Amino acid sequence: MALSGIEIFKLTPRTNCKECGFPTCMAFSMKVASGAVEIGKCPHISDEAKEKLSEATAPPMKTITVGTGDAERKLGGETVLFRHEKTLVSRPLVAVQFADSMSDDIIDAKIANVQKVDYERIGEQMNAESVSVKFDGDKDKYIKLVEKVAALNKVVVLVCDDVAVATEALALVKGAKPVLVGANKDNINEMVALAKDNGAVLGLCADTVEEMYSLVETAQAADYKELILNPGTASMAKTLENTIEIRRTAITGGDRVLGYPSIVFVNDLAGGDPYLETALAATYVLKYGSIIVLSDITYAQALPFFGLRQNIFTDPQKPMRVEPKVYEFANPKEDSPVLLTVDFALTYFVVSGEIERAKAPAYLLIPDAGGYSVLTSWAAGKFGASVIANMVKESGIEQKLTVKKLVLPGKVAVLKGDLQEELPGWEIIVGPEEAMQIPKFLNEFK
């Protein structure tokens, strides 16, 4: 049963040392009680108290680590069902599936796509973090395939229910914290022993929640809790139903037996339809997939999918921001205009998109405006003349220009006078009020 902030506070040293990052032990205790901070953040708490608190304050869903080094990722650890309740903490991984039944050409094409789809969006690198390797019957080819895709330095998911084959495959990725999916009611004991020996996360497979519950109890009885749950691929409806029931049982039902991340094979559910596969992947971003397995990855799939994932797995109380700096468009020159906007991500993408549409050389200056929209940041005093002038001076943009023209967003035209005083030598121009007017403005700009 969860402890209250007061109960946690009584177990802390109560020295208010601030080494945990909070001003008082009480403030720290309240954050621990809400699940926002781990008790281990307190460097002075006793081992006895830590053990007691760790069990009581642990999230209802266990956090599982997969992969190592640069490929290491966290799964699970969620405390709520919905983003509007609280921030979701572990974004789902995307895995691309390979199989020994595929031709070499198809395998090579998929590897090329995994390497090709890799880009940054609002400070986050977007790519497939995992590769899944399915055993379809050709052991020798399967072993070679595991060795080949393991070189991609991704989280490796082995899909194999043959204990002998899985033993050989795991030996190739031992030490890389792989995932082994294939434990079922017929092989659970052998697979648990194999996963324990190789430090792998074990994927349990069941088509019903009751059967899954029994498998988890068996694994836990063998003292193994590095688990991930595969709710099956019997049908799209049944898989979704099972996935939701498992998560609800753990989060709102308080039954930690099912408190583990899940892996969903949307590639199998979609039956070869890439549009359906993308739609299903988006569904499981919202409905509790921790690893989502795709048949392949292309930019057409990745752009909407990763955008959705980033929107869902961000803190709704913190605005999404882009880096404050000078952005360049169409190889700007020393007489190109410098447009100005704020660091709120949505504003940046709208404005930058219109500048790109204009195909005119230009700079875009982004000061630190607190991550708010233009009018909000101006009203909050974060987008004033002094802030903009300081950014102009610190960015070094002046050294790139012989003609200094700064274009203000039309909605803050009131700043023109103050900016002329702050930036002598610059011509301050009031630009369009709406981003959609930027192409016409730039194409007529002199």
Image (tube, grey):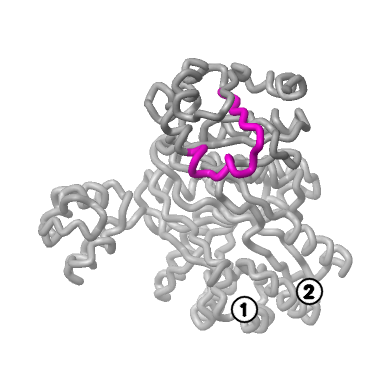
Residue 23 visible in the picture: yes
Report, in whole angstroms, how far the alpha carbon at label 1 lies from the one at label 2: 20 Å
Q: Using the image as rendered, state which of residue 411 and residue 319 is in the foreground.
A: 411
Question: Would you identify the image quadrant in which residue 177 lies?
Answer: bottom right
Residues shaded magenta? 391-408
Q: Amino acid at mark 2?
A: Gly
Q: Looking at numbered disc 1 in the image, what kind of residue is underneath it? A: Val
Where 350 sits versus 235, above or below?
above
Identify residue for label 2: 137
Q: Nearer the viewer, residue 345 or 71?
A: 345
Residue at horizontal 13%, vertical 56%? 16
Say which residue appears at 66% left-offset and 30% top-offset. Answer: 337
> What is the x, y in percent for residue 68?
53, 72
Q: Nearer the viewer, residue 347 or 75?
A: 347
For image coordinates 56% across by 52% down, the residue present is 92
Q: Look at the picture and state if 54 lies above or below 425.
A: below
